[in-house]
Image (cartoon, rainbow, N blue to C red):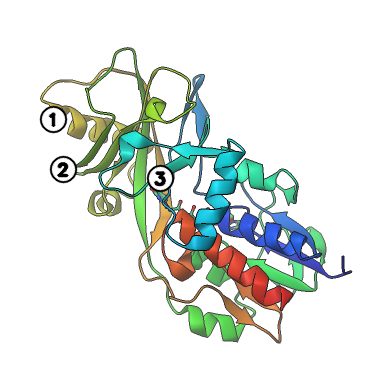
Amino acid sequence: MTDERIAIVGAGMAGLACAERLVRGGRQVVLFDKGRRVGGRMATRRQAGRQFDHGAQFFTARDPSFQEAVRGWQALGVVGEWAQAGEDAETRWVGSGSNRALPEHLAASLDVRLGTAIAPLDGRTIHTEEGRWLGRFDEVVVTAPPTQAAALLACSDTLLARLGNPTHSPCWAVIAAFAERPCEEDVLRDRGALQWIARDASKPGRPKGETWVIHANEAWSRANLEHGPERVADELLRCWAHSLGRPMRPTFAVAHRWRYARVTDPIGEPFLRDPEARLTLAGDGLLGPRVEAAWLSGVAAAEAILG
Ligand SMILES: Cc1cc2nc3c(=O)[nH]c(=O)nc-3n(C[C@H](O)[C@H](O)[C@H](O)COP(=O)(O)OP(=O)(O)OC[C@H]3O[C@@H](n4cnc5c(N)ncnc54)[C@H](O)[C@@H]3O)c2cc1C
């Protein structure tokens, strides 16, 4: 253990992977996240006594180091295969019981401060958005989505220059429950404005019931970005009903807007570092909008810091 204290902004897959590696390397790490739960876009929402994975639906594992990590989580029962989502030979992995199970497992042994929105950094000094001083750290890693990261890292010309003007695609998601099964399939892809429709309860270890998640495609989400959630839920359910040729009667439906769902122009390097300022940027904005890419970025950033 060294006396070096490292702050990580963001407790999604990148921040958690980075923290876990740094702690194994003997560093003292504190994670700050503005959310009420860990996981970021690897999210599970509970509503009306039901649960829904309304962000990332599943993840794949292509890099040998991530495959090894996934095998370890599988052995612990933290993740499982979701056979119903398969459309080719590649395994689709999900958290066991909920997708948030994986980030919660990673966070269990870490120092995570939730409900803590961090203001633009003043070097390595960290304040909340309300101005509360949280400390001066020896190193700071930012893992927020790139547009938000650019605001946090405005103090580093080096990082800002390399970050450029990041762009994201948004995604409107609808979570809906039904008294009766609305269609035979567990997963439907590309139905008009709907990119993805999935029966959440078909994932391993989920409570029984007709719990469904719908994702609008990028064009529809962008065109309707500022519409209210009630209107969005209504319109997307009507799209689904139209494709099925019969009305949908959910017991409830709620829309959630992911404004920064997926980065559209990933940087192509695993992390960016300003070695003089000792500031690092990691997250899925570096290697691409996938859970695996976020994890790889977090680990690579940690290894660079450990030297
Ligand atoms: C609708 C949707 C569907 C997806 N489907 C898939 C899929 O099927 N498969 C797949 O592999 N990937 C999918 N993805 C992408 C995947 O979810 C992400 O690539 C991955 O989870 C990103 O992890 P991350 O740690 O880089 O970022 P995030 O998970 O976004 O974590 C960043 C964290 O930073 C926090 N934060 C931001 N600003 C601040 C601040 N100022 N102060 C404190 N905290 C802050 C946020 O609260 C967040 O928790 C999907 C994403 C969405 C939105």
Q: Are marks 1 and 2 in contact (CB under 8 Å)?
A: yes
| Mark drawn on residue 252 | none
Indicate left or right for 193 with 58 as reference: left
Mark 2: amino acid: Gly
| Mark drawn on residue 192 | 2
Mark 1: amino acid: His
Residue at numbered disc 1: 242
**Residue 58 position in % (x across, y down):** 41, 44
Mark 3 or mark 1, which has the lower sequence index? 1
Marks 3 and 1, Cα distance to the nearest angstrom? 22 Å
Q: Nearer the viewer, residue 210 or 219?
A: 210
Marks 1 and 2, Cα distance to the nearest angstrom? 9 Å
**Residue 11 position in % (x across, y down):** 63, 53
x 73%, y 74%: residue: 306
In the orientation shown, which residue stands out farthest toward the left?
A: 245
Marks 2 and 3, Cα distance to the nearest angstrom? 19 Å
Q: Quadrant of residue 129?
A: bottom right
Nearest to viewer (mark 2 / mark 3): 2
Residue at numbered disc 3: 257
Q: Are marks 3 and 1 in contact (CB under 8 Å)?
A: no
Mark 1 or mark 2, which has the lower sequence index? 2
Determine if residue 302 is in view. yes
Mark 1 lies on a secondary structure that is helix
x 49%, y 20%: residue: 48
Q: Residue 186, relative to residue 19: is it above or below?
A: above
